[in-house]
Amino acid sequence: MIRWLDKEEITKDIWRRFIRDSHVSGRYVRKEGRWTVDEENTDIHWTDSDYAKVQRNLLRTIDLGGTVFGYFKGDRMLGVASVEGRKLGPEKNYAALSCMYVTEDARRKGIGRELFESAKQAAGQLGAEYLYVSAPNCEDTQAFYKAMGCVEAAWYCDELAEKHPDDCKLEIRLGGRIEPLDVYTHCPVLIGPNLILKQVEMVDAEELLLCYSDEKALPFFNADNCDGDDFHYTTLSRMQEAILFWQDSYEDKCFVRFTITGRHSGETFGTVEMFHRVAEDAFNHCGVLRLDLRSDCETPVRIEEVLYLANKYLYDLFGVDVIITKCIPEASVREICLKRYGYQRSSDKLLGRYSDYYVRERLHSFER
């Protein structure tokens, strides 16, 4: 999973079993105004001083208000990336990706893609329109960034150009919209100031069991039209069965289950489900949002940040202009938060029998 790193975590221990070796078979160079590839046959090996230098740079990034995040499997870091906190450019509309590395034995497994998507989200949180990338001119590196959608930058940062004159200067426009249905080909990581929404994985089972075995939280779960499943799971095996079902449903393009994880703590304490509903009732072509939280996290701070991310991203991800979510009368804190974020109680019933739904129509000037 991807999680944010604090300064206290950025020690030499994070490089344990991290292999930053690579082979370079070609490099991009500009000749007569055109990019060409010069063949090369070079192996790159990092020394202890190389790791120490990157470590110092990551600490400096945090000191200056930037963000550092790593991709972890268990306690091992497989990848790391950082986005600077200072916007660049004549219009101050660029945020800079200052590093991105994936350990040699974990490359070509989608980790780089997830880190890059997280970097885009972090840049968007800064209010940037573009992510600026000063990337090594190695052929494989450039192929990766091209696949991510990067193009040659329209503006060059003189400071970075002086530091890394041979790098290729790239950019990608962030925008505010994510193409509909993209969620079922690549499920993005949605990042808020204090929360991360990420597709559920089996490693989340133990922490999610604390949510789904919580009898105080159970009444707030939305089990409408779920074939008798009340989402009350009391054993790890039953929780794992549920996650497997959620994963299979994603593959069948039925819905997405995101875990809700504290950005700084790394603790997972609930889930969000979302899908584009097609039915012959008042909620046809609406996005259905299901929010399940551990009872001690049913607080305005937690609920409102989930709603912020939903308002910002989920309309476009699921191709809807209306989102509905269930809120029973006893969920008074949730009801206040929903109203604050533009949801209104509906008198319509889902399938003619399920009530207590709140509706929010897209506010284009905000989401876009």
Image (cartoon, grey):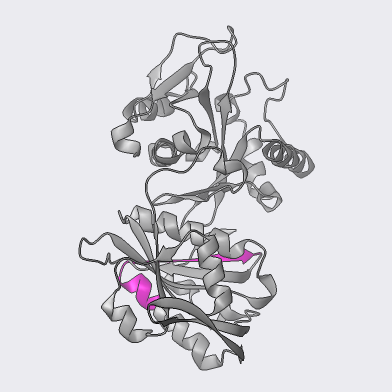
* Residue toward you, 356 or 108: 108
Task: State whether residue 342 appears in this view.
Answer: yes
Name the quadrant containing residue 59. bottom left
In the image, residue 106 above or below residue 46: above
For residue 201, side relative to residue 324 (left or right): right
The residue under the point 60% across, 47% down is 199
- The residue lying toward the viewer, choosing from 133 and 350, is 133
Quarter containing the N terminus:
bottom right
Where is residue 108 drawn, in percent x and y?
A: 66, 67
Residue under the image location 56 percent in, 69 percent down: 143
Residue 21 lies, in percent from the top left, at 62, 84
Q: Which residues are magenta?
A: 59-73
Observer able to see residue 14: no
Q: Nearer the viewer, residue 136 or 345?
A: 136
Which residue extends farthest left?
A: 90
Q: Residue at x 48, y 69 (%)?
A: 81
Frontmost residue, 50 versus 139? 139
In the rendered image of this protein, does residue 172 appear above or below residue 163? above
Residue 191 screen position, x and y as percent: 45, 51
The quarter of the picture where the C terminus appears is: top left
Confirm whether the magenta stretch covers residue 300: no
Q: Please tell me which residue is depicted at 44% across the width and 40% down the height of the picture.
A: 313
